[in-house]
Image (cartoon, rainbow, N blue to C red):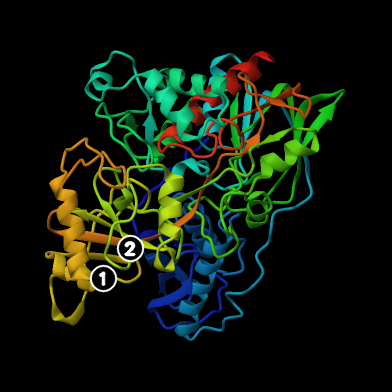
Amino acid sequence: MKLFKFNPVFYVVFAAFLLCACSKVEMTPGIYNGTAKGHNAPLNVEVTVSEHAIEAISVKEHKETPGVSTPAFKNVLQAILDNQSVDVDAVSGATVTSNALIEAVTKALEQTGADMSFFTKSVERKVKGKKIKKTADVVVIGAGGAGCAAAVQAHQCGASVIIIDKMAAMGGNTILAGGIQNAVKDGSAQAIANNDSQEKFFQQTISGGDYQGDTALVRILTSQAWDALEWQESIGMKFGRTPSSVPGSLGNRGYGVQGGANGYFVAYGKYFESNENIELMLSTKALDLIEKNGRIVGVKCSDDAGNDITLMANKGVVIATGGFGQNVAMRQKYNEQWEDLGESVKSTNSPAITGDGIVMAEKVGADLVQMGNIQLLPHADPETGRLGNIAGASGNGIFINKEGNRFVNEAGRRDEMSHGTLAQTDGVMWIVVGGFRGFGPGFGGAGGFGGGDSENGDASIIFHKTDNTITAQTIEGLAEGMGVPVKNLKAAIADYNKRYLSTKPDKFGRDLFLSKIEPPYTAQLRKPAVHHTMGGLRIDTDTHVLDKDGNAIPGLYAAGEVTGGIHGTNRLGGNALSEIVVFGRIAGRNAAGGK
């Protein structure tokens, strides 16, 4: 099995030298550019042609979501080169990016003087409609963080495993995370330094969700998180040993994986490659669960080639398909906390997160719990819903409204921060930090700040309109770029800096002030977006999916965001990555044993 490796560079080049001897197309050799609207912003390609063929395609600029869009860049452009045609298939789960690439390449080719009918010729597709049947001890639906943990653990317990995903690459929603995972080892130097313990972790998690979380499930999460982290290291992941916090985490107990969230899937991919009796099937969508004599025994699927696939499970099926943050109809149906969660409200999630597993399990009688508990995170780009790493650690910056004032505890609960932001003018705010110039493609990821447009000839203001980002050497310059009263902004920054390293709460209740806000100053315009759906399938402590009478549905297990009842009304930052590994392992272990 070939591991797909995510490469975060902006320039993706695919070269082809397959010239058709019978080619009759005539072009003016050269390099041509084409631009089309992508999922998040316009993308630009550079197409190199000879007299008779497309020689190479380079993606010169894009702001597509890392991980999710990568298969489109790889597969679509390679297909255009191999077939010398733009009549190629879009990649499932990345159709907007795929179509944008096809359109951009088409626009570039139109400038070459070629007869475009040559490049729009039909490409021979694979024969569709095959019936394929496979059998394994355990079938896992979803190759994100929870699904991969379940698959590896089940395999380590001696089971043969098939893991599927409807996307063209594994990663799910997890690959968009920052890779910060909460865990506490009682009595460790880190726990002592941060006055932390597993009991405090438990109490903050249960109270942070307004005591709606199932106490038994929360106890498992908080007590097994450190063991999960060590298990991850045993299969090749590397974690730092200096804990940090993320927005809404309520403490310093987050450990970062090397390579960010992609580090998970490098390790999982290597495991899949190097072991027998574990198969990863991508671009394979689960349609229905197969039930026989009251037990779940398999999954009906289809793939991108239109094949009818039946996967039988001797011991168990694990659902790990994530939540429903990108399913607007489901958001609106279950919403109880917010004024509106319609099309105008963006989501930080992968396009794949559409509630598939919840719908499938409901068909076989699964019970749902706390579906109205939907989390918004205030740190999203107003136009795209993407997260940038300026969101960073919750103790490092302040939120400023359009009047130039602070208005909320920036180190508090995520729902409180989101409600507070939505109450401001236009429902937006600026995150302001000091001495910070990295803008990575994901939440907490690393990246470089490069260039910008200086307004009014003032070099102290660098305004990135596409990223809603401003940097300045002075507060006056920052205020001008933000369009807020300088007097109010100065007062807000001065008040914050006075409290550096203080643990005494300010008027907003904030008691975490980790660094001063000093030049160069940076601000990003942010707006709340759907981030996590805390409701989902009801499970027990063994991850059995329960029916409406509270009984386990034989053969069916679930883990990750597809489940509900763990986080209550509000998920603490950093708990999701702990949850997917802790409960993914439990699901894999129990499914492998048919327990």
341 up-or-down from 86: above or below: above
Which residue occupies 45% across, 43% down? 175
Q: Which residue is mark 1?
A: 484
Q: Residues within 10 Å of mark 1 (few under 14, many from 20)?
A: some
Determine the CA span between mark 2 and mark 1.
8 Å
Q: Which residue is mark 2?
A: 401
Task: Name which residue type carries label 2.
Answer: Asn
Q: What quarter of the picture does the C terminus occupy?
A: top right
Residue 197 lies in quadrant: top left
Q: Is residue 563 left or right of residue 175?
A: right
Q: How far across and down, in percent of the image, does residue 475 sit? A: 15, 65
Identify the residue at the far front of this view: 507
User: Answer yes or no: do the residues labelled 2 and 1 have beta carbons within 8 Å?
Assistant: yes
Task: Answer few, some or many: residues within 10 Å of disc 2's Cα (few below 14, many 20 plus, some between 14 and 19).
Answer: many
User: Residue at the right extreme?
Assistant: 293
The picture places residue 55, in percent across and down from the top left corner, at 43, 68
Q: Amino acid at mark 1?
A: Val
The structure residue drawn at horizontal position 63% and vertical position 17%, both measured from the top left corner, is 590
Task: Please indicate whether residue 566 sits to the left or right of residue 333 in the image.
Answer: left
> Along the polypeptide, which appears first: circle 2 or circle 1?
2
Taking depth in this image into account, of 544 and 260 the one nearest to the observer is: 544
Residue drawn 29% across the image and 13% down it: 187
Residue 444 % position (x, y):
33, 45
Residue 47 has which mark? Answer: none
For the point 59% across and 17% down, which residue is it?
A: 589
**SS for callout 2:** loop
Residue most extreme to the bottom: 113
